[in-house]
Image: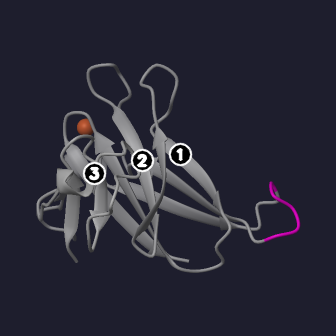
Amino acid sequence: MKVFECGVCGHLEFNEAPEVCLVCRAKKDAFSENADAIKKPADPANLTDAEKKHIPKIVVVKECGLIPGQCCTDVHVKVGEIQHVMVPEHFIRCIDYYLNYAFISRVWLSPEACNPGAALHLNAPSGTITAIENCNQHGNWMAEVEV
Ligand SMILES: [Fe+2]
């Protein structure tokens, strides 16, 4: 699958560049294809500690009850299996969510007040959920889960 990166804000889109960046509103020509935009573990079966600190962990909770009377699929994202630090010099800047490879939301994280995690309440009973976190020092890391 192709990955396109916004040259203004770094936002990533799958398959094709959008007319306008959904994060910073830059125009389509600000995007370029970047096959290396998302870091990949060297050996997925034997993750290093550094990789465990960056690859998101996705936990899905159905029927959480916050939004009564309709579908609510909670998607919790934690960075990562070994918790990433949140200090001003080194922190998780944001977590982007995608449903079926279409961008749906970005959660910004401040190193002073936020843990390295986020949650969304999706009105979606099924689909592929992708989370991409951005570390200010170590780039973009991805995980996905089928709901
Ligand atoms: Fe990092």
- Name the secondary structure under disc 2: strand
Residue lying at the far right of the rendered structure:
69
Determine the residue positioned at 76% across, 61% down.
64
Which SS type dominates the magenta stretch?
loop
Determine the residue positioned at 80% across, 54% down.
66
Q: Are marks 3 and 1 in contact (CB under 8 Å)?
A: no
Task: For marks 3 and 2, give the CA distance.
Answer: 22 Å
Determine the residue positioned at 88% across, 68% down.
69
Is 69 covered by the magenta stretch?
yes
Task: Identify the residue under disc 3.
Answer: 27
**Label 1, ligand 1: CB separation under 8 Å:** no
For the record, the magenta segment spans 66-70
Q: Earlier in the sequence, mark 2 or mark 1?
A: 2
Q: Are marks 2 and 1 in contact (CB under 8 Å)?
A: yes
**Where in the figure is residue 136, as x and y percent of width and height?**
25, 34
Whether residue 44 sits left or right of residue 71 in the image: it is: left
Task: Identify the residue under disc 2.
Answer: 95
Amino acid beneath label 2: Ile
Task: For marks 2 and 1, give the CA distance.
Answer: 7 Å
Amino acid beneath label 3: Lys
Nearer to me, 50 or 24:
24
Q: Is residue 91 above or below residue 124?
A: above
Task: Identify the residue under disc 1.
Answer: 118
Locate residue 57: give its quadrant: bottom left
Amino acid beneath label 1: Ala
Q: Earlier in the sequence, mark 3 or mark 1?
A: 3
